[in-house]
Image: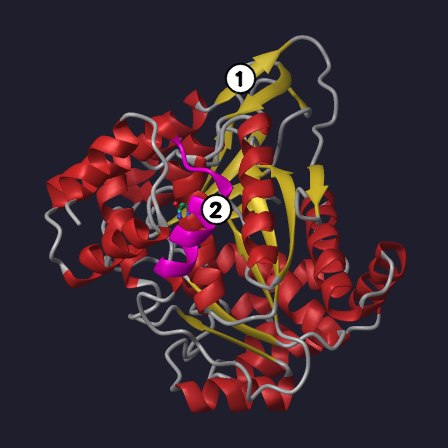
Amino acid sequence: MRMYDIIQNKRDGGVMSDEEIQFFVDGVTSGDIPDYQITALLMAIYFQGMNEHETSALTLAMAKSGDMIDLSGIKGVTVDKHSTGGVGDKTTLIIAPIVSALGGKLAKMSGRGLGHTGGTVDKFESFAGFNTELPPEQFINQVNDIGICVVGQSGNLAPCDKKLYALRDVTATVNSVPLIASSIMSKKIAAGSSSIVLDVKTGSGAFMKTLEDSKLLAQKMVDIGYSVGRKTAALITNMDIPLGHAIGNALEVKEAIETLKGNGPKDLTEVCVALASNMTMLVTDKSIEECEKMVLGAIADGSALKKLHDMVAAQGGDANMVDHPELLPLSNHIENVLAPCDGYIKHMDAEKIGIASVILGAGREKKGEAIDYSAGIILKAKTGDLVKKGDVIAEFHTNLPEKMKSAEELFLSAIEYSNKAIDAPVLVYDIISKPSK
Ligand code: URA
């Protein structure tokens, strides 16, 4: 088998056989296929696409390219959740304790933030002492003991995807539905949970900028999940606006705690209730209405907040910070950002706002960089709000005061105003919970 022939066939719109897909995945993982041939094939896939069978075969081969996590030692139904990434997306911190309080088993591997999007592992590490690197036995034991554990992704989970993703990132081949679907689902399948809920973000802060592409991606991932025996559902949610008001690790943790107390922002609460209800439905097989009641109940009776407390304590973190969020890291410099004019906020570019918070120290531009857990942005106004010139529209938190000005310039350029009232944005566009055939 020759890579040249595989590239030529895909370039001309042909279908890859299972053997060719396995040959490609093996060669990428072992390092035998040079980067120029890998990227030529990625570009051919970008333009020609892949059919359903090819996408499933690529996903499964990538999942098996490294460790397949064995969760068979966990008693109960394991359920995982994945977001395609966004700004202010702290949903895992809220949903995982809720679903665990309702009996789902959350054995979760999460990532760190990169670029304009944050990462769940960094957010949890805002709790002093919180350990996200547990040995596999401790990971399983904690899930059996308290129903929930969140760790960083194992180094050898889907190594083929790791290599492909790094190459896609620098060759303009990220935004391809079969490549994103196989990348995400290979990691979810290797991570072992029997049911999966996907939060497919759509809009300016997301990989998928249009609703049409997001639906296509969501359906592809649900199809792949079912084709390998995992119950899978996908929600398509709005990432044209950052979710909630807080952006930045400790600030988002504080907002998550408030949401678990029932005092969270309306948009964040609505998206979390929808995601948690769909996860509970996969775990319990009850109706969506019953699951929604159960989710609201776990917030109202404090059991979800207690679960977060137990989890932080079990992973060596300072659980006192859950009871007293004011103990979480706080920046030395907090400044208000003012509206430059009167008007309704018509649009917020979530990606630019995410980058502004990275400038303040909340994120990393390169892998492995240190981050400042306390840094970030609190939005005081969001899309649809009417503001007057000089009103406070955001609060910037940083330990790098010299960065305030450039972050503020970028932030202000992210916001468009209108003199006409704006309709309330839709938060959950669609739910896809069945395979397409
Ligand atoms: N997230 C992933 O893990 N892979 C992609 O291709 C895009 C987003």
Q: Nearer the viewer, residue 400 or 383?
A: 383
Q: Nearer the viewer, residue 84 or 335?
A: 84
Q: Nearer the viewer, residue 23 or 95?
A: 23
Q: Within the image, what quadrant is residue 63 found in?
A: bottom left
Q: Within the image, what quadrant is residue 12 found in?
A: top left
Residue 353 screen position, x and y as percent: 44, 34
Residue 363 screen position, x and y as percent: 34, 50
Q: Which residue is mark 1?
A: 416
Q: Please give the name of the residue rendered at 85% of the width and 64% of the height, measured from the top-left corner.
A: 286
Cα distance in 3D space between marks 1 and 2: 43 Å
Label 1–label 2 contact, CB within 8 A: no
- The prevailing secondary structure element of the residues shown in magenta is helix
Mark 2 Cα-neighbour bin, 10 Å: few <14, some 14–19, many ≥20: some
Tell me, for residue 195, which label it has, or none: none
Q: Please give the name of the residue rendered at 57% of the width and 56% of the height, measured from the top-left corner.
A: 227
Residue farthest to the top, as pictured: 419
Amino acid at the residue labelled 1? Glu
Q: Which residue is mark 2?
A: 53
Left or right side of 259 for 23: left
